[in-house]
Amino acid sequence: MNKVYRYSDEELIKFLADIESDLVERKRSFKNDAEKIRQTVCAFANDLPGHDRPGILFIGAEDNGEPSNIIVDDELILTLADMRDDGNILPMPVMTVEKRILKGANMAIVTVMPSDMPPVRYKGQIWIRVGARRAIAHAQDERRLNEKRRYKDLPFDLQPVPRASIEDLSRLIFENEYLQAAFAPDVLRENNRSYEERLSSCKMVVSPEDATPTILGILTLGKTPQDYIPGAYIQFLRIDGNELFDPIIDEEEIRGTVIDVIRRTEEKLKSHNRTAVSINHGQHIVSMDYPHITFQQILYNAIMHRTYEGTNAPVRVYWFNDRVEFNSPGGPFGNVSISNFSKPGITDYRNPNIADVFKTIGFIQRYGIGIQTAQNAMRKNGNPELEFKCNESMVVCILRAKK
């Protein structure tokens, strides 16, 4: 993925003065233009003109480039930075936010790199730059963005599956479930896009002309995903004891699309999670062996961050009497290392487009907080904190039972 280029003060001042540039947007403040600012980030990430250079968003500048003299404090910087991770712009933009002094005044500078995985959507709409203004992409614009994606260094989840064909994807799931969640209603009402064009826009096939399914397409819409990605399933065991050789009282290989696998695994976990009700001062207090939200967050992470390349190993969920273990193939990735794993604020995505699907379907609400959410739920439920063991080939999360 591209690294963000940092413009010098001299370059920024020149951009401030260039009111015709399609690489520049100026906003007097964030409060009154929050939606337009997010649309602009989306448009810069799509880079339809093909500049292959970062777009710049000035917060605290008038239309003529002069300072509007707003207060640029930590709260504003954090609010702007949150646009990257709140899950409304998909795929997540590569961007930085910083406070700079230009023309003797404070300004917040948002620098957005062109995406390696266009088209980028904001709340289901694809925004682009047309000259010095924003616009919603038309079908021809989408085709150009899809074509750009073909020549990028793509992550594994966008690689084609040569043996598969468009017939291996479920059109029913795509049109009746996925599209409804991925795109705004007014976009769906425009029926001038072919089935292949819509699949390509969602990155489920390589392009409208080459409708070979991608890894993402097979995992999300595949009729039989495990025929092409054998390890893409959950192996569930409920063991009556604390050791692997103790009796197994329930076992299942949970197969299907990643959406089906998640939903069925959640139901399996619910069925084994005992609930207790106690009465304290006339109040009914309900507690479980394990908080279900922790199961959800760890399950999503195990599937989203696992490696699908070069292994036929499934995600293993082994439930012992004293603990539950989630074993995910593949070690830490990118900025995440063995030494900093599970620390707040340190995230990276081996499968960024699978992460987008999870956000689109509603499994996750925002990025980068799953483990912390799971930890907080464990403490509130009276369980010990989560334990993590990882090396170059696996990540294991252990949930301990309440004492």
Image: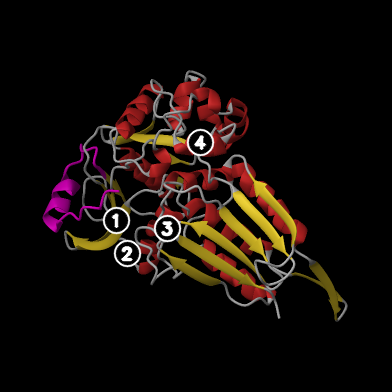
Q: Camera-side residue: 40 or 237?
A: 237
Q: CA distance from mark 4 to mark 2?
A: 51 Å
Q: CA distance from mark 3 to mark 2?
A: 15 Å
Q: CA distance from mark 3 to mark 1?
A: 18 Å
- Point out the residue furthest to the front here: 245
Instruction: State the residue position of label 2.
Output: 72
Q: CA distance from mark 1 to mark 2?
A: 8 Å
In the rendered structure, find residue 228 and report the number of the disc placed on it: 4
Q: Quadrant of residue 241?
A: bottom right
User: Going from the N terminus, do you reach mark 3 or mark 1 first?
Assistant: 1
Magenta residue span:
1-24
User: Going from the N terminus, do you reach mark 3 or mark 2 first?
Assistant: 2
Q: Is residue 19 left or right of residue 275?
A: left
Q: Is residue 182 visible?
A: no
Q: Residues within 10 Å of mark 3 (few under 14, many from 20)?
A: some
Does residue 17 show up magenta in the picture?
A: yes
Q: Which amino acid, by three-letter code, is at mark 2?
A: Val
Instruction: State the residue position of label 3.
Output: 82
Q: Position of residue 25 (x, y in %)?
A: 28, 44
Q: Which amino acid, by three-letter code, is at mark 4?
A: Tyr
Instruction: State the residue position of label 1.
Output: 60
- Point out the residue furthest to the left here: 10
Instruction: Give the foreground label among 4 and 2.
Output: 4
- Give me the residue at 68% from left, 62% from top: 292
Do the CB atoms of the residues marked 4 and 1 lie less than 8 Å apart?
Answer: no
Q: Secondary structure at mark 4?
A: loop
Instruction: Give the foreground label among 4 and 1.
Output: 4
Q: Is residue 46 above or below residue 388?
A: above
Q: Secondary structure at mark 2?
A: loop
Q: Position of residue 176 (x, y in %)?
A: 62, 30
Q: Is residue 18 left or right of residue 142?
A: left
